[in-house]
Image (tube, grey):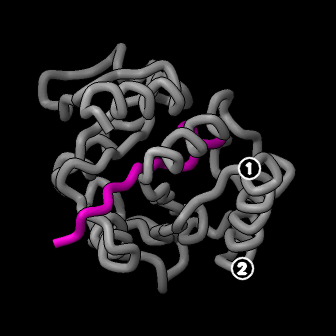
Amino acid sequence: MHEKRAVFLDRDGTLIEEVNYLARIDQVRLVDGSIEALRLARSAGLATVLVTNQSAIGRAFLRESELEEIHAHLGALLESAGARLDGIYFCPHHPEAILDEYRRVCPCRKPNVGMLLRAAEDLGVELEGSLMVGDRFHDVEAGRRAGCRTVLVETGYGADEWRSRKPTDPQPDHVAANLLEAVRWYLREFEI
């Protein structure tokens, strides 16, 4: 059993500003407070892990190599500000992808837990009691299925998701203005 916990976070609308099918480096802009949130989590001994659905690949908006360039740029941007991610996991698949090799139901695509399970194994992280933060209900559902605490942030699509929620939508443990508020809540709530 692992003892280390993590903050798992969605990319678009959570860590960086939402851009419909982001496909270029120049579209990467951090959400206010993201740098401080990552620094705070790491100073508390938590791993910081990006888990992101990237159907833009299967929809032929960008190639995996271009996504890797975007993530390298994001990593450099974070490091230049004294923050970093311990891992980046993405799922390029979608049941209705245009490209045949990416058209499938994938156990990694949120709300499924494949990316979180793989990250936990790779990084020696305990899912139970870790935190999943995202701006969509499928992020919340993935976190709940994995045994994590969950926060829906109001950045990206989050405010609209929360405002138009249905009784069947997964209930997050907390709703926060942004990633920084989510991490602060988690650390305070669980005395980490």
What is the span of residues highlighted in magenta in the rendered image?
Answer: 1-18
Q: Residue furthest right?
A: 26
Q: Residue at x 40, y 41 (%)?
A: 133
Question: Is residue 3 something one can see in this rendering?
Answer: yes
Residue at 59% x, 62% y is 56
- Residue 92 lies, with reference to residue 39, above or below; the image says below
What quarter of the picture does the N terminus occupy? bottom left
Badge 1 amino acid: Gly
Spot occupied by residue 22 in the image (x, y as percentages of width and height): 69, 52
Distance CA(mark 1)–CA(mark 2): 26 Å
Total marks shown come to: 2
Mark 1 lies on residue: 82
Quadrant of the snapshot with the C terminus: top left
Q: x and y percent of residue 164 in the render?
A: 33, 17
Evaluate whether residue 52 shows in this view: no
Badge number at residue 65: 2
Between tags 1 and 2, which lies in front?
1
**Residue at (42, 53) in percent of width and height:** 46
Figure quadrant of residue 84? bottom right
Q: Tell me, yes or no, whether the two marked residues, 1 and 2, touch with CB atoms within 8 Å.
A: no
Crowdedness near tag 2: few (<14), some (14–19) or many (≥20) residues, C-alpha within 10 Å: few
Residue 31 falls within the magenta-colored stretch: no
Q: Quadrant of residue 141?
A: top left
- In which quadrant of the rendered view does residue 175 lie? top left
Q: Secondary structure at mark 1?
A: loop
Magenta span: helix, strand or loop, mainly? loop
Magenta-colored stretch includes residue 14? yes
Which residue is pictured at 65% across the width and 77% down the height?
Answer: 64
Nearest the viewer among 67 and 103 is 67
Q: Residues within 10 Å of mark 1 (few under 14, many from 20)?
A: few
Three-letter code for the amino acid on which mark 2 is drawn: Ser
Q: Is residue 188 left or right of residue 28?
A: left
